[in-house]
């Protein structure tokens, strides 16, 4: 494709405007993908506003991409034109560092995000290193699969890293864009699942999505009742919490894992960590191999994002609704 049309942002916090760019010659290791769907992730909003100080303007946001391969570089062997693929947060890595050699490309210091220093998925097409374009199982619907490429792997990775299995007890803080997928994956692993939320109205949906139990996290008695019961608690929210209460809810060797970014430093007392050999950690998306595995699990266990659909030209409308927290779980743009 000689040029690619998309919707880009030219300054921090600005609205998206039509943007056309020349992708240049296709590199030997790259693929070009004609985009059918792209999820609207809260990370896109952070990049639009330059909250993380890493945005490079102008750029086209979008990193939850589903589409069809239209062109492959001369070094690509595992993909052919017509393959339906998914692309997530990462578009490239160095390929030779310690972490790339271990198959943990998401930890590569030279990792290239899909829409930082390059153009992403709010567009008609995108180019990435073919290693980061994963074939989608036929059973997955393109629209509901798109958010799996970031939100899905973000919650799947810590579940797998923690060795969650049918004997595990897993808590999920926040029943939103990330949390509603975490509940589904934790249930697919056979775990006993507890949903923590400040919103009592989320209870029925949390139970429908896979939770065995709902805890209103502003109810001190309810939190006290689950003290010492959880092997893993996954925090999917971007709000400050009384973290000591969640550490107290952990069993010995339990882990509180953060995948949402609270606005203030996370503070916990050391003694409960030491006394119960508990830990607090974070998790960083996942490697291409782990994403492919996650997609397969989603297909076999009917894990799917709950989505609201917008036309690609309605990207500003979707972003505006996301700013106001008016999206019911995940927004997806469609070409």
Image: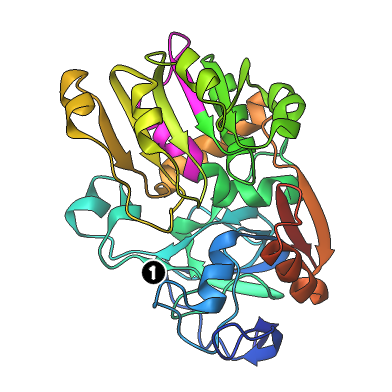
Q: Residue at x 18, y 33 (%)?
A: 270
The image quarter containing residue 131 is bottom left
Quarter of the image containing the N terminus?
bottom right
Whether residue 189 appears in this view of the structure is no
The magenta region covers 154-171
Position of residue 272 measured from the top left corner of the image (x, y, whole percent): 23, 25
Q: Residue at x 64, y 84 (%)?
A: 8
The image quarter containing residue 70 is bottom right
Q: Is residue 12 above or below residue 297?
A: below
Q: Secondary structure at mark 1?
A: strand
- Is residue 136 one of those drawn in magenta? no
Neighbour class for label 1 at 10 Å: few (<14), some, many (≥20)? some
Q: Is residue 4 above or below residue 320?
A: below
Q: Which is nearer the eye, 148 or 76?
A: 148
Whether residue 326 appears in this view of the structure is yes
Q: Which residue is mark 1?
A: 112
Left or right, 271 with reference to 188: left
- Is residue 167 one of those drawn in magenta? yes
Position of residue 13 measured from the top left corner of the image (x, y, whole percent): 59, 82
Position of residue 279 measured from the top left corner of the image (x, y, whole percent): 25, 31
Q: Which is nearer the eye, 294 or 313?
A: 313
Farthest front residue in view = 220
Quarter of the image containing the C terminus?
bottom right
Q: Is residue 248 above or below residue 18?
A: above
């Amino acid at each position: 494709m000689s040029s690619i049309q998309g919707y880009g942002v030219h300054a921090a916090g600005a609205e998206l405007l039509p943007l056309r760019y020349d992708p240049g010659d296709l590199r030997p290791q790259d693929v070009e993908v004609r985009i059918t769907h792209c999820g609207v992730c809260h990370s896109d909003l952070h990049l639009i506003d330059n909250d993380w100080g890493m945005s490079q303007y102008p750029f086209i946001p979008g990193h939850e991409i589903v589409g069809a391969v239209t062109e492959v570089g001369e070094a690509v062997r595992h993909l052919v034109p017509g393959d339906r693929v998914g692309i997530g947060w990462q578009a490239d890595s160095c390929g030779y560092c310690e972490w790339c050699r271990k198959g943990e490309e998401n930890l590569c210091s030279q990792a290239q995000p899909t829409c930082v220093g390059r153009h992403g998925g709010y567009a008609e097409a995108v180019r990435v290193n073919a290693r980061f374009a994963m074939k989608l199982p036929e059973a997955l619907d393109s629209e509901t699969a798109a958010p799996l490429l970031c939100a899905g792997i973000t919650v799947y990775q810590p579940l797998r890293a923690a060795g969650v299995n049918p004997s595990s007890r897993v808590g999920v803080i926040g029943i939103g864009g990330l949390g509603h997928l975490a509940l589904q994956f934790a249930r697919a692993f056979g775990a006993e699942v507890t949903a923590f939320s400040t919103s009592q109205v989320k209870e029925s949906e949390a139970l429908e999505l896979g939770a065995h139990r709902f805890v209103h996290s502003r109810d001190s008695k309810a939190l006290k009742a689950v003290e010492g019961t959880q092997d893993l608690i996954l925090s999917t929210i971007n709000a400050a919490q009384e973290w000591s209460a969640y550490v107290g809810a952990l069993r010995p060797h339990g882990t509180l894992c953060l995948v949402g970014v609270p606005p203030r430093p996370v503070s916990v007392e050391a003694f409960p960590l030491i006394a119960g050999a508990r830990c607090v950690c974070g998790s960083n998306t996942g490697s291409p191999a782990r994403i492919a595995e996650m997609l397969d699990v989603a297909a076999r266990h009917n894990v799917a994002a709950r989505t609201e659909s917008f036309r690609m030209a309605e990207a500003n409308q979707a972003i505006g609704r996301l700013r106001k927290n008016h999206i019911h779980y995940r927004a997806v743009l469609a070409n």
